[in-house]
Image (cartoon, rainbow, N blue to C red):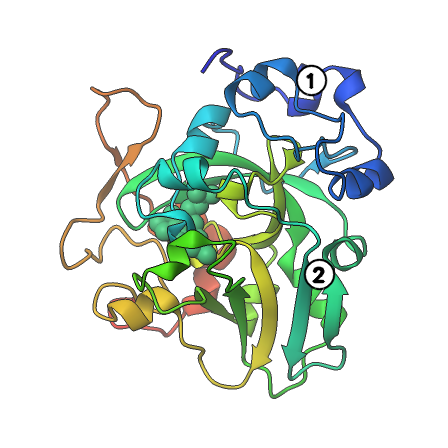
Amino acid sequence: MLIQKPADIRPSEITSKENYLNRRDFIRAGSIAGASVLAGPALGAIVPDQQRARLADVARSEFSTIEAPNDYEDVTTYNNFYEFGTGKDDPHQNAQDFDPRPWSITVAGHAEKTGTFHFEDFIRLFDLEERIYRMRCVEAWSMVIPWVGISLADVVKHYQPTSKARYVAFETLHDPVRMPGQRRRVLDWPYREGLTIAEAMNPLPILAVGVYGETMPNQNGAPIRLVVPWKYGFKGIKSIVRINFVEKQPQTSWNMAAAREYGFYANVNPEVDHPRWSQARERRIGAGLFAARQPTLMFNGYGEQVAHLYSGLDLRKNY
Ligand SMILES: Nc1nc2c(c(=O)[nH]1)N[C@H]1C(S)=C(S)[C@@H](COP(=O)(O)O)O[C@H]1N2
Ligand SMILES: [Mo]
């Protein structure tokens, strides 16, 4: 990392005004390849990506942690995105040529409003916010990531699910030409995830469209991905093309691959170990080679906001 950003300074205070766009420009910029609206010089020097643009007028949400975010390089070069390879550096290496625009999102199933929408039309109805969240991967590492996104609850309310809708299912783009990792059957593509309606209506989950005040880097799930901060990272499905309101608990990729290891709920829980490793502690990326692993918190520290969703549920059985 060339420049270490001090904690708790908004990206907007670091980056020069020229790099800012108004919201209309941001939306337009996304569709112009090689637009002149590049990341600030320091960021551009690390990860050149012609398509990134600043997201303007983004207020920080009260749900943000005051913990120091991981630096930009960690967030954008240490990734899990099997559509672009199974290594940590693969997504950053192999997703550079992925072009996430134009993009459309289909909303289907038990809802009053359904249809297929251009990405820009889909997000423009909702307020963008910055949400700095802890992310705990099931592999026992963690980061703090400054996302920019829209509230999933707002999206769900807008489409008006009917009483038949008990779950929301999400799907990633399935296109082995554009996502070369899908040519190997490491998972049953497309990547699939889901939440209960109550989880989706909680104020914490977001559909993220950026990090560090910029449009989403490809390797982080461009142009739009789910973030559910109290669940293991694999629930945060990337590059979403389909949102489906369903009656039955949907099949989810990691659960289909290894049900004993990855449950549908996947709430962060230091007391329920993965069959092959302990979940009691985590390695904070960027903390340094000799830093001690830190304790993992129940619900990743978001219990106050979400524990009520699971009252009466045996979290050992419903892992
Ligand atoms: N489509 C898709 N979404 C995905 C994954 C994936 O392989 N494919 N990996 C998941 C896992 S295991 C984690 S930890 C997070 C990582 O998000 P990040 O790379 O933006 O930190 O994305 C999740 N979303
Ligand atoms: Mo993960």
Q: Secondary structure at mark 1?
A: loop
| Nearer-N-terminus badge (1/2) | 1
Judged left or right of residue 255, residue 57 is right
| Residue at 68% in and 84% down | 162
| Residue at 60% in and 70% down | 243
Amino acid on which the number 2 mark rests in the picture: Asp
Residue 172 drawn above or below residue 287: below
Residue 20 in the image: x percent, y percent? 78, 25
Q: Quadrant of the C terminus?
A: bottom left
Residue 291: quarter of image: top left
Residue pushed farthest front?
177
Residue 7 drawn above or below residue 222: above
Judged left or right of residue 238, residue 56 is right
Q: CA distance from mark 1 to mark 2?
A: 29 Å
Residue 54 drawn above or below residue 261: above
Front disc: 1 or 2: 1
Q: Secondary structure at mark 2?
A: helix
Q: Check disc 1 and report the residue beneath it.
A: 15
Judged left or right of residue 237, residue 186 is left
Q: Nearer the viewer, residue 156 or 176?
A: 176
Residue 294 in the image: x percent, y percent? 27, 33
| Residue at 59% in and 82% down | 165
Amino acid on which the number 1 mark rests in the picture: Thr
Q: Quadrant of the N terminus?
A: top left
Q: Check disc 2 and report the residue beneath it.
A: 154
How busy is the neighbourhood of tag 1: few (under 14 within 10 Å), some, or many (20 plus)?
Answer: some
